Image: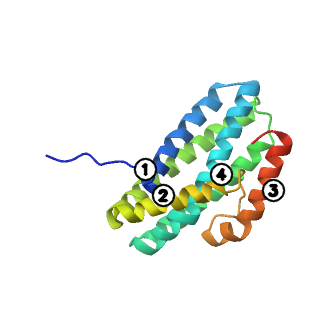
């Protein structure tokens, strides 16, 4: 009889897959809302996407590149997708949340992000789960949570690698968090 996998809130895979579910839910909430409720839902979505991608870029992608046979190619594809998503998010930030253009672009982004998450779960997370032991996954989970705690809260297209995040990330995070405090939108 097969045992069910034990999930842990600090296992990097469980943590990031849980966030993928939250992201899908926030897309649904944003698309279903209007006015101030839509703006708030979008801000929550944008923030989660920004910190989530930073954690993946700093913690998961580098390990996948080193540990997986096809890791470099898979990570390169994910980084391209992340760049495109960040670019689209930056465009969305400038639009009226109740405009038809916003709804169309947000729907495009949702579809791309869901496809991206599916690839990550299949091409990176599952394979890392096979290659790494529980202690490594737990350690990566703690590192991912720390990366999110100090990550930028807005998308920064062009900052998709571990090195770029470590160089530009702290300054971008400081500016984002100051902007969030000043505008009350963060």
Mark 4 touches mark 2? (CB < 8 Å):
no
Report the disc number at residue 50: 4
- Mark positioned earlier in the residue sequence (3 or 4): 4
Horizontal and vertical percent position of residue 13: 43, 54
- Mark positioned earlier in the residue sequence (2 or 1): 1
> What is the distance, in whole Å, between disc 2 and disc 1 at their CAs?
8 Å
| Vertical side of 138 occupied by 66: above or below | below
- Which of label 2 and label 1 is nearer to you? 2
- Which of label 4 and label 2 is nearer to you? 2
Q: Which residue is mark 2?
A: 141
Report the disc number at residue 80: none
- Name which residue lies at 56% across and 47% down: 113
- Name which residue lies at 78% across and 58% down: 174
Q: Which residue is mark 1?
A: 14
Q: Secondary structure at mark 1?
A: helix
Q: Is residue 169 left or right of residue 122?
A: right
Mark 3 touches mark 1? (CB < 8 Å):
no
- Name which residue lies at 71% across and 59% down: 157
Of 121 and 182, nearer the camera is: 182
> What is the distance, in whole Å, between disc 3 and disc 4 at their CAs?
14 Å
Q: Which residue is mark 3?
A: 175
> Few, some or many C-alpha atoms within 10 Å of disc 2 (few <14, some 14-19, many ≥20)?
many
- Mark positioned earlier in the residue sequence (4 or 1): 1
Q: Secondary structure at mark 2?
A: helix
> What is the distance, in whole Å, between disc 4 and disc 2 at their CAs?
17 Å
| Vertical side of 9 occupied by 63: above or below | below
Horizontal and vertical percent position of residue 169: 71, 63
């Amino acid at each position: 009889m097969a045992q069910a996998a034990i999930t842990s809130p600090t296992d990097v895979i469980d943590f990031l897959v849980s966030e993928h579910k939250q992201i899908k839910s926030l897309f649904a909430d944003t698309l279903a809302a209007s006015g101030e409720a839509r703006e708030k839902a979008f801000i929550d979505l944008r923030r989660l996407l920004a910190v989530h991608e930073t954690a993946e870029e700093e913690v998961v992608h580098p390990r996948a590149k080193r540990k997986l046979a096809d890791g470099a190619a898979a990570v390169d594809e994910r980084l391209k997708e992340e760049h495109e998503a960040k670019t689209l998010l930056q465009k969305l930030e400038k639009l009226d949340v109740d405009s038809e253009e916003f709804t169309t672009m947000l729907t495009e982004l949702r579809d791309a992000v869901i496809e991206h998450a599916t690839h990550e779960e299949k091409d990176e997370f599952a394979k890392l789960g096979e290659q790494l032991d529980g202690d490594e996954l737990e350690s990566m989970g703690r590192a991912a949570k720390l990366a999110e705690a100090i990550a930028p809260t807005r998308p920064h297209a062009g900052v998709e690698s571990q090195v770029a995040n470590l160089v530009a990330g702290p300054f971008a995070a400081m500016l984002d968090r100051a902007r969030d405090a000043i505008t009350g939108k963060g």
